[in-house]
Image (cartoon, rainbow, N blue to C red):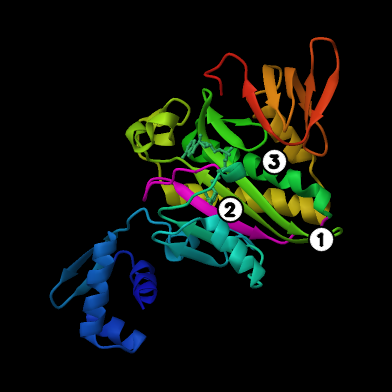
């Protein structure tokens, strides 16, 4: 009901909509309308009411509900269904549950806060309430499972591109799953997959983006390596605009890849936004450490590192750090 009231108020942005009209159109009493309006005010909506004229929506809060995101979202697949939670364990866990139950491709799970946000290999992802974007997207690409690493690259390019479009900040991508600004982490991406030998059941792309945190919102142990767009830019950033831009960019690159088998554009953008190509890096795999210059990424999304002795390595997973920079 609240969503329906909002839709109507948004439909007439310049006019007062009378309680009578709302109650007629929605088939509930005027008292019920008044209660819902008050609940919306508690969510942060600034709704003015003038006796005998009605209600007018003056300002909406920067919350990431379906009504707010979908209003101006230009996609055909991603975000047609958006599930919003005030608080959740992990949006990736929720997305995986829903994918198992048959949720449609393109379903988006967003939370204002995560209590058990996850990074890779069981690490924790700090997700304070109302400050960042904690979002997971369900994909069901009809490609072979060996293509999975490409979806991490593709998502990193989409997020970096969206951040650049919305904030004009020249953020960079650090292989394989981070977006950084001056060597501090703005965003991490966690891609998880369920697959058989020759087909993918689903992929969940989870992204955590630090938007309006101040440095004190992060625990001390990550204050040296984490930052937010607001810290960098010195002003609040619209989370709604950024979510829309991410979904639009991701859809474009995703469809280009799965429908037209075109991954070239993503690779080129990835390289142009890379924060590590040409630099000296240290890559940590399961047992070994490789040190050298990050020279390229290949068609499969692997990072190519050249050691001092000329030996070439293809790295497909693991942690990469830029040598000499904060150890990160
Ligand atoms: P990662 O394993 O590359 O990075 C995790 C590490 O990053 C942590 O060990 C910690 O040092 C640091 N860290 C934790 N929180 C933050 C933060 N807010 N900003 C910067 N650094 C941080 C990266 O994993 C993948 C993260 C994906 C998070 C999304 S949020 C939506 C979805 N749901 C979920 O549970 N995870 C994903």
The residue that disc 3 covers is 153
Q: Residue furthest left?
A: 51
Residue 247, labelled with which disc?
2
State whether residue 142 appears in this view: yes
- Alpha-carbon neighbours of circle 1 within 10 Å: few (<14), some, or many (≥20)? few
Instruction: Give the mark, 2 or 1, whose residue is nearer the N terminus.
Output: 1
C-alpha gap between disc 3 and disc 2: 15 Å
State yes or no: residue 158 in magenta. Answer: no
Tag 1 residue: 196
Q: Residue at horizontal 43%, vertical 35%? A: 228
Q: Earlier in the sequence, mark 3 or mark 2?
A: 3
Distance Cα–Cα, label 2 vs label 1: 27 Å
What residue span does the magenta drawing correspond to? 123-143
Q: Earlier in the sequence, mark 3 or mark 1?
A: 3
Placement of the N terminus among the 4 image quadrants: bottom left
Judged from the image, the secondary structure of the residue bearing numbered disc 2 is helix
């Amino acid at each position: 009901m609240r969503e329906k009231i909002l839709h109507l108020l948004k439909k007439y942005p310049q006019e007062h909509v009378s309680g009578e009209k709302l109650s007629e159109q929605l088939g509930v009493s005027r008292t019920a309308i008044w209660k819902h309006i008050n609940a919306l005010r508690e969510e942060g909506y600034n709704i003015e009411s003038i006796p005998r004229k009605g209600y007018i929506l003056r300002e909406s809060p920067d919350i990431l509900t379906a009504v707010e995101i979908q209003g101006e979202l230009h996609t055909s697949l991603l975000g047609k269904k958006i599930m919003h939670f005030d608080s959740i364990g992990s949006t990736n866990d929720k997305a995986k549950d829903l994918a198992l139950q048959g949720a449609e491709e393109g379903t988006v799970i967003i939370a204002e806060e995560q209590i058990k946000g996850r990074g890779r290999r069981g690490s924790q992802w700090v997700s304070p309430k109302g400050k960042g974007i904690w979002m997971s997207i369900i994909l069901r690409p009809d490609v072979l499972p060996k293509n999975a690493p490409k979806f991490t690259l593709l998502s990193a390019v989409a997020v970096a591109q969206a951040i650049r479009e919305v904030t004009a900040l020249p953020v960079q991508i650090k292989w394989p799953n981070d977006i950084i600004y001056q060597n501090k982490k703005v965003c991490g991406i966690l891609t998880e997959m369920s697959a058989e030998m020759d087909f993918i059941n689903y992929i969940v792309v989870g992204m955590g983006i630090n938007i309006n945190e101040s440095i004190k919102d992060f625990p001390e142990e990550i204050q040296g390596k984490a930052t937010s767009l607001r810290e960098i830019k010195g002003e609040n950033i619209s989370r709604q605009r950024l979510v829309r831009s991410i979904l639009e960019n991701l859809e474009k690159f995703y469809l280009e890849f799965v429908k037209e088998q075109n991954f070239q554009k993503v690779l080129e953008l990835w390289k142009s936004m890379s924060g590590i190509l040409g630099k000296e890096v240290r890559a940590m795999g399961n047992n070994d450490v490789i040190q050298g210059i990050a020279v390229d990424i290949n068609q499969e999304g692997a990072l190519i590192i050249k050691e001092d002795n000329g030996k070439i390595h293809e790295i497909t997973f693991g942690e990469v750090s830029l040598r000499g920079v904060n150890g990160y």
